[in-house]
Amino acid sequence: MKEHNIEVLERDFQAKIDNDIKIEPKDWMPDEYRQTLIRQISQHAHSEVVGMLPEGNWITRAPNLRRKAVLLAKVQDEAGHGLYLYSAAETLGADREQTIDDLHSGKAKYSSIFNYPTLSWADMGAVGWLVDGAAIMNQVPLCRCSYGPYARAMVRVCKEESFHQRQGFEIMTTLAQGTAEQKAMAQDALNRFWWPALMMFGPPDEDSKHTKQSMDWKIKRHTNDELRQMMVDITVPQAELIGLTIPDPDLKWNKEKGGYDFGEINWDEFWQVVKGNGPCNKDRIETRRKAKENGAWVREAANAFAEKRKLRNTKKAS
Amino acid sequence: MANKEWPLYEVFIRSKQGLSHKHVGSLRAADEQMAIDNARDVYTRRSEGISIWVVESNSVFASDPNDADSLYEPSNSKVYRHPTFYDVPDGIEHM
Amino acid sequence: MNALFEYLLRLGDDSLILGHRLSEWCGHGPILEEDIAMTNLSLDLIGQATSFLKYAGEVEGKSRNEDDLAFLRFEREYKNLLLVERPNQNFGATMMRQFLFDAYRKLFFERLVHSTDSQLSAIAAKSLKETKYHLKHSSEWVIRLGDGTEESHEKMQSALDDLWKYSAELFYQDDVDEDLIENGIIPAVDAIKGEWDVLVRNVLEQATLIIPSNNWEQVGGRKGIHSEHLGYILAELQYMQRAYPGMKW
């Protein structure tokens, strides 16, 4: 293609974005836009799928039948969301199998929060309340993302997620109103998940290498720090309401900015976990890798059977 | 063949009697029957549908966005196809 | 002993324990689509367990609710089939276990719908719809994997060889059943057995699998005599209720 043509295409493309016209799979798009989306959508998909594991850890130990069903349905939703997102990535030419192999080889990343262990039933509450809370905050703006299939997948995801956070908060509320032992369990879960949840929004804006371009392309609508601030402002009163304490001695209402000031996030820890040194990184990937490996004969057999049946049907027809 | 991925299917769901099937997303399945089962499990968990179509993604033939001008713009000037193009005197109802 | 109570435990425990087994797959399925499908099966079964055990509690009249019954009995008091507590092993074995069970359950619920007990009939009507889909799903997989590759065929044959001896217990009958059958509360098992044979043979034939010639019947679950596996299932299932007695969750 001629230089001139590319320039025109790029100008038209940016004009569409500026006018909030969605980009669809077959439309021309700059290669970096495509790559950025593939990276973000597949990371997002991986996060959903790896995210099944910490909660999956408690399905067989849920304390009653209602909680068991709710937790199962929630983790199942996450599988569904992973699937919607892999599908969206496939519209950009990213093959699911390849994408997943990149996860297993460590090349592709996923949300670092899922590398923390779930150690008590209260963690099901904390994960739903904080982790899904943070995820929703990230995801709601993505429903307006410039890439059509991603935006549509996110609309579906957000609709379904609305119960996820509530069930988590319900668990926390029940515990906070329960016995001293239960309340301690809830507080302990909050203590362990608070900071990792705030890290979910990614590095501070000054260190976030993708933010500016993603905002220009309307893939991203808010910066990491903006979203993090929203999360703190929304969550602190919720904790207060149920009588739990946010584990941050520096947390203070700032009247001027109309939001909370909060303590320093341990970014060393964040980067270590991202690099693979979190408490569960190896286990999570190993579990996913095994699931794929153990299922290989199933997928292969299903293919073989489909071929056989096709052959039989054509024979019958002729 | 050992590592051949299952084909991709596009899923269309009729949400209730009287409405048309609408594209909702895609999934992988080894055959059509499995595609229907999977579509049911993946895309109708909240009673979103009463009928499912699945079409292998390879079989979908799409128009080229580059042809959009010539395909869709010519109809813009044919305003006489819309009822609002016509004057109806005041006092006339049910038309 | 209250026969209806005892019988409801059998029904409820079958659903509870199989639902538990299936839930162990969540996050580990052979492909995402099937992960979601197995969770749906599990959710249906846990729903059924809830209905049966809730009703069992009412019938018993000692103010035990469905959770008390699901979480706070001792091992010998669980009355599920040995079949449903078999470990998942691989996906093929899980589908084989599911198929043998679903084939029975579908035929059973079709008749239980006509129970003279209106509660049972209502639970059966809802469960039948679910079970029809379960059976469709598990039969398709049994056929697909049985007639798939050499490897999958071997795995399915070995699953069938392993599970077949537990299938006889599906038709276990004792004095608990007698009264209930007589009063039209539950269907007679004999007729189901005949249809089950036809259905199962048909699917296994399509799957190119051979029914083991050994007719040894492994039973015990209905009397509360289980395999060693149930103890571990209960250790997980009951962990919270045992560790933190009497709390609300």
Image (cartoon, rainbow, N blue to C red):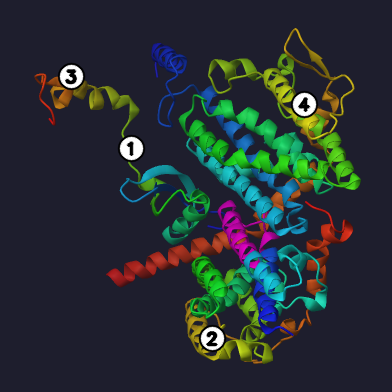
Q: Secondary structure at mark 3?
A: helix
Q: Nearer the viewer, mark 1 or mark 4?
A: 4
Q: Is residue A95 visible?
A: no
Labels 3 and 2 within one chain: no
Query: According to the image, label 2 marks what residue?
Result: C184
Q: Secondary structure at mark 2?
A: loop
Q: Amino acid at mark 2?
A: Gly
Relative to A51, is B63 on the left or the right? left
Cβ atoms at labels 1 and 4 below 8 Å apart: no
**Residue C188, numbered circle:** none
Query: According to the image, label 1 marks what residue?
Result: B62
Q: Nearer the viewer, mark 1 or mark 2?
A: 2
Q: Nearer the viewer, mark 3 or mark 2?
A: 2
Q: CA gap, disc 3 to disc 2?
A: 73 Å
Residue closer to the observer: A150 or C234: C234
Query: According to the image, label 4 marks what residue?
Result: A236
Labels 3 and 1 within one chain: yes
Q: CA gap, disc 1 to disc 2?
A: 60 Å
Residue closer to the observer: A93 or C61: C61
Between discs 3 and 1, the one toward the N terminus? 1
Q: For the magenta stretch, what is the residue range?
A: C22-49
Q: Name above or below for residue A130 compared with residue C92.
A: above
**Residue B77, numbered circle:** 3
Q: Say which residue appears at 63% left-offset and 73% top-offset.
A: C97
Q: Amino acid at mark 1?
A: Ala
Q: Say which residue appears at 54% left-offset and 86% top-offset.
A: C184
Label 2 marks a residue whose chain is C
Occupied quadrant, residue C230: bottom right
Q: Name above or below for residue A262 compared with residue A130.
A: above
Q: Secondary structure at mark 4?
A: helix
Q: Position of residue A285 (x, y in %)?
A: 73, 46
